[in-house]
Image (cartoon, rainbow, N blue to C red):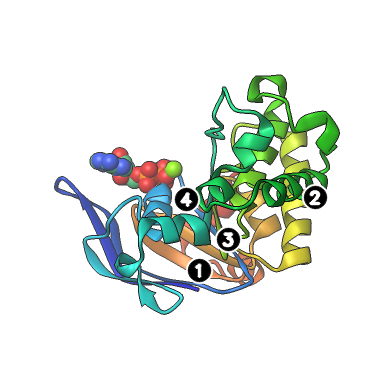
């Protein structure tokens, strides 16, 4: 669904992504893991055109990413970030309905979609649709962030350390929920994390990024069984 071909990104004089080639397969969960500063967020932002790449090509559904209008990207790709980015003075329903509203969906259709998503994420619509973000727990806010990203049924979900700020139990719950949603709808997901356990649990395809370069990629099991070098071994052994 998304192809990176020899992509580089240079900030000032620093090459932060160096000759990256990566295929995000339709219907799969691709996880990029790497330490802080390794370039993970930069990859994600180039995928949805929040950042322009300097070298190489990025194709989305077979077409150069630069040829898409920003509003088409917003409709076709859902984006979830660590700090949920919810609008504090908007209700849950208004937050979830952001993109459908931009797309001029009818009111009834937006309401129905909001209720459907809340139910799917195990939040009772009657209880939650009129609440404000500060009236929710961290885990609930993050669920609303996921619901908002999924509202207009995007073709791909881009998730940048979506559960990073949560306690371990809430985090495990949301990971399981994401797995369940993925099984139900087979949505394509590109998720970023620095947590190896999260990566191993979620990934169909795992990509290890270090200093803007891919150290190894493949299915988690074969990476575990045949780590390419000491860097990978160190990473798999980490537990932070
Ligand atoms: P990660 O998400 O893996 O922590 P990032 O992709 O955010 O890493 O950053 C990778 C590198 O690029 C870091 O060295 C960071 O300082 C640098 N960087 C990121 N955004 C910018 C920017 N807008 N201007 C200059 N340097 C940046
Ligand atoms: Mg980041």
Q: Quadrant of ligand 2?
A: top left
In the displayed orientation, state which residue is furthest to the top. 134
Question: Distance between the Cα atoms at labels 1 and 4?
Answer: 12 Å
Comes first in the chain, label 4 or label 3: 4
Q: Nearer the viewer, residue 69 or 227?
A: 69
Which residue was labeled with disc 4? 34
**Counting residues from the N terminus, which is met first, the one under dot 1 or under dot 2?**
2
* Marks 4 and 3 in Cβ contact (< 8 Å): no
State yes or no: Cβ of the residue under disc 1 lies below 8 Å from any atom of ligand 1: no
Residue at the bottom extreme, as displayed: 62
Q: Where is residue 116 shown, x and y percent of the image?
A: 78, 50
Q: CA distance from mark 1 to mark 3?
A: 25 Å
Q: Which residue is mark 3?
A: 154
| Residue 190 to residue 13: above or below | below
Residue at image x 84%, y 33%? 126
* Residue 142 in view in this figure: no
Q: Secondary structure at mark 1?
A: strand
The residue pinned by badge 2 equals: 120
Q: Residue at x 42, y 48 (%)?
A: 41
Decide: is 44 above or below 5: above
């Amino acid at each position: 669904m998304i192809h990176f071909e020899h992509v580089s990104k240079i900030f000032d004089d620093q090459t932060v992504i160096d000759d990256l080639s990566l295929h995000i397969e339709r219907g799969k969960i691709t996880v990029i893991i790497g330490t802080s500063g390794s370039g993970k967020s930069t990859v994600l932002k180039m995928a949805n055109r929040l950042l322009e790449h300097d070298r190489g090509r990025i194709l989305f559904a077979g077409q150069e990413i630069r040829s898409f209008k920003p509003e088409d990207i917003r409709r076709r790709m859902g984006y979830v970030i660590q700090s949920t980015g919810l609008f504090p003075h908007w209700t849950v329903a208004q937050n979830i309905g952001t993109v459908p509203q931009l797309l001029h969906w009818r009111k009834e259709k937006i309401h129905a979609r909001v209720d459907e998503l809340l139910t799917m994420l195990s939040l009772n619509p009657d209880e939650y649709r009129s609440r404000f973000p500060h009236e929710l727990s961290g885990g609930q806010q993050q669920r609303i962030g996921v619901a908002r990203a999924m509202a207009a049924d995007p073709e791909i979900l881009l998730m940048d350390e979506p559960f990073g700020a949560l306690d371990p139990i809430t985090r495990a719950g949301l990971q399981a929920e994401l797995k369940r949603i993925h099984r139900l709808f087979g949505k394509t997901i590109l998720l970023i994390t620095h947590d190896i356990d999260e990566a191993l649990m979620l990934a169909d395809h795992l990509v290890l990024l270090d200093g803007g370069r891919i150290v190894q990629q493949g299915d988690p099991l074969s990476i575990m069984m045949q780590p390419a070098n000491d860097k990978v071994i160190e990473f798999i052994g980490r537990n932070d």
